Image (cartoon, rainbow, N blue to C red):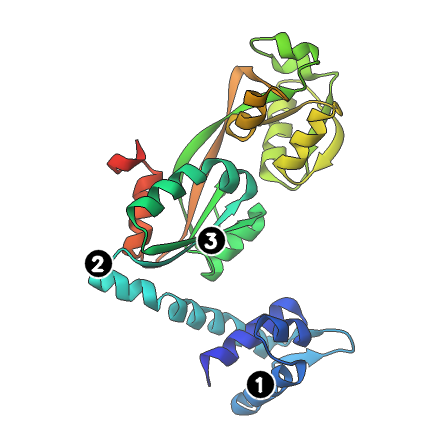
Amino acid sequence: MHIETLKIFCDVVETASFSKAGSMNSMTQSAVSQQILSLEKKLGRTLLERGRRQCCVTPEGAVLLEAAKEMLDIYNSLGERFNELADVVAGELHISAVYSVGLHDLPPYLKAFRKIYPQVDVQVAYRRSAQVYAQVLSGEAVMGLVAYPAVRKGIHIEPFKDDEMVVICPPSHPFAECEKIAPIALKKERFIAFDPDLPTRQYLDRHFRENGVMLGHAIEFDNIETVKRAVEIEQGISILPKASVKDEEESGVLKAIPLDPPLRRPLGILLKRNRPRSPALREFLALLQGKTAEAS
C-alpha cells in the first residue's frame, strides 16, 4: 500500500468524484479507478459505493479515510520533524487564514519573518472560517488564523491580537463628520453586512441585539473587499476592522469612525493538538505574539 494511493483515496472521498481526484493528482479517471480497485482488493473491502454521477464512502471506507488522514498527516510532517531534530529554521510553513486577517493583519509579520528566515517557504491559503479549522485539523495547514476563535475538538487556540472595529461610510455621509458613533445611531441606516454564517456577522448581530439595536441588513457579502466597494458607491454603511480600511481612509474614499463604547474583534491562532512544532513554526508563533525583538 503506497502513501500516494491513500492520498488519491482521500481526494476521491472529499470530492466525491474520480475525475476531480484525477485532476488533483495529474492522473486519468481510469487510473484513479484502478488505484481504488487495487486498494479494495488488497484490503478485501468495498470502500466506495459508485453511483452514476458520484460516489460515496462505505462504513469500511470511512474507517480507512480516518486512518489514511492520520498517516498522511504523519508523512507530511516528516520534514518538520527532521528540522526539529536538527533545530533548523527551514522548510515549508503552510498557513490558512480568513481573508480579512490574511490580507490585512498578517502581511507585516510575513515580511518581517521572510527577512529573518529567507530559507523558510511560507505559503498562505485564504479561506472562509470553517475551512481554516478543517485545514488545521487535517494537517494541510500547520497554523490557522481566524476571528472570534471557537473551541473545537482537536484544536488548540492561542491569542494573536485584537482588531478595533469601526463604522465605515462614504465622505458624503453625515457620519463622516462624527468623532464617535453610538450603537443607537445605526438603527435606521442601510447596513452592508457579512453573510449570516460568518463569525464576525454573528458577533455583530448579537452585540447590537444586546444593545437594543436591530441593524437593517440591506446587502450581504462574504468578504471585506466587496463590503468596502459597496460602501464606496453609497449603498450603505458597514462595520469593519480598522486595519482593513487603512488604504481607503488615507486616499479619502472612505471614512472610519470609532464606536462608542469601543468594539474590538479578537483574533486567534489555531494549532492542531499534539502536533509537533517545527523550529520554523515556533519562530513564527513567537513573532506573531511579540516574543521576539523583530515583532516590536
Q: Residue furthest left?
A: 86
CB atoms of marks 2 and 1 within 8 Å: no
Other-residue count near label 3 (Cα within 10 Å), few / some / many at <14 / 14–19 / ≥20? few
Where disc 2 sits, the SS reads: loop
Seen at 76% across and 25% down, the residue is: 235
Seen at 58% across and 85% down, the residue is: 35
Q: Say whether disc 3 or disc 1 marks the residue closer to the N-terminus.
A: 1
CB atoms of marks 3 and 2 within 8 Å: no
- x then y, percent, for residue 31: 62, 85
Between circles 3 and 1, the one closer to the viewer is 1
Q: Which residue is mark 1?
A: 35
Is residue 264 depicted above or below 183 in this figure? below
Amino acid type of the residue that numbered disc 1 sits on in the rendered structure: Gln
Q: Quadrant of residue 231?
A: top right
Q: Residue 170 got which mark?
A: none
Is residue 152 depicted above or below 223 in this figure? below
- x then y, percent, for residue 183: 62, 16
- x then y, percent, for residue 267: 46, 36
Viewer-nearest residue: 152 or 251: 251
Q: Quadrant of residue 116?
A: top left
Q: Residue 87 got which mark?
A: 2
- Using the rendered image of the protein, determine whether residue 223 is visible from the camera's viewpoint: yes
Other-residue count near label 1 (Cα within 10 Å), few / some / many at <14 / 14–19 / ≥20? some
Amino acid type of the residue that numbered disc 2 sits on in the rendered structure: Asp
Q: Which residue is mark 3?
A: 153
Other-residue count near label 2 (Cα within 10 Å), few / some / many at <14 / 14–19 / ≥20? few
Image quadrant holding the C terminus, namely top left
